[in-house]
Image (spheres, helix red, strand yellow):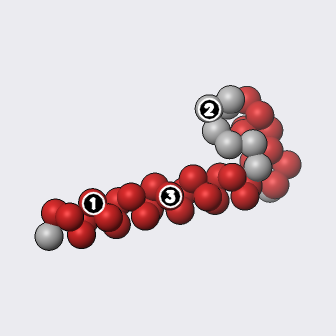
Amino acid sequence: MSKQKNKKVQHNPAMPKTDVEFAHTGLEKVALKAQERQHNK
């Protein structure tokens, strides 16, 4: 499974190259959405 994931990442230059980077960007997006929700309330 991890090998397939790595191939997909390599084909898409816009995506982060490592799982760690991918996890960090995902967490940042989640955090930003959470902040937006708090501001909207």
Q: Residue furthest right?
A: 3
Callout 1–callout 2 Cβ contact below 8 Å: no
Looking at the rendered image, the quarter that the C terminus falls into is bottom left
Mark 2 sits on what residue?
Answer: 14
Residue 22 x, y percent position in the rendering: 65, 52
Closer to the observer: label 2 or label 3? Answer: 3
Q: Secondary structure at mark 3?
A: helix
Q: Which amino acid type is marked by label 2? A: Ala
From the viewer's perspective, is 11 left or right of 26?
right
Mark 1 sits on what residue?
Answer: 36
What is the quadrant of residue 9 in the picture?
top right
From the viewer's perspective, is 40 left or right of 25?
left
Q: Secondary structure at mark 1?
A: helix
Q: Residue furthest left?
A: 41
Badge number at residue 1: none
Q: Which amino acid type is marked by label 3? A: Glu
Q: Give the spatial CA distance, label 2 vs label 3.
A: 16 Å
Q: Which amino acid type is marked by label 1? A: Glu
Using a 10 Å C-alpha cutoff, classify the residue at mark 3 as few (fewer than 14 neighbours), some (14 to 19) or many (20 or more): few
Badge number at residue 28: 3
Mark before the other along the chain sequence, 1 or 2: 2
From the viewer's perspective, is 36 left or right of 26?
left
Q: Is residue 39 or residue 20 the one in the foreground?
A: 39
From the viewer's perspective, is 32 left or right of 13?
left
Residue 10 x, y percent position in the rendering: 77, 34
**Residue at x 27%, y 60% (from the top left corner):** 36
Residue 34 x, y percent position in the rendering: 34, 66
Residue 12 x, y percent position in the rendering: 67, 31
Q: Give the spatial CA distance, label 1 vs label 2.
A: 24 Å
**Residue at x 80%, y 56% (from the top left corner):** 1
**Residue at x 50%, y 58% (from the top left corner):** 28
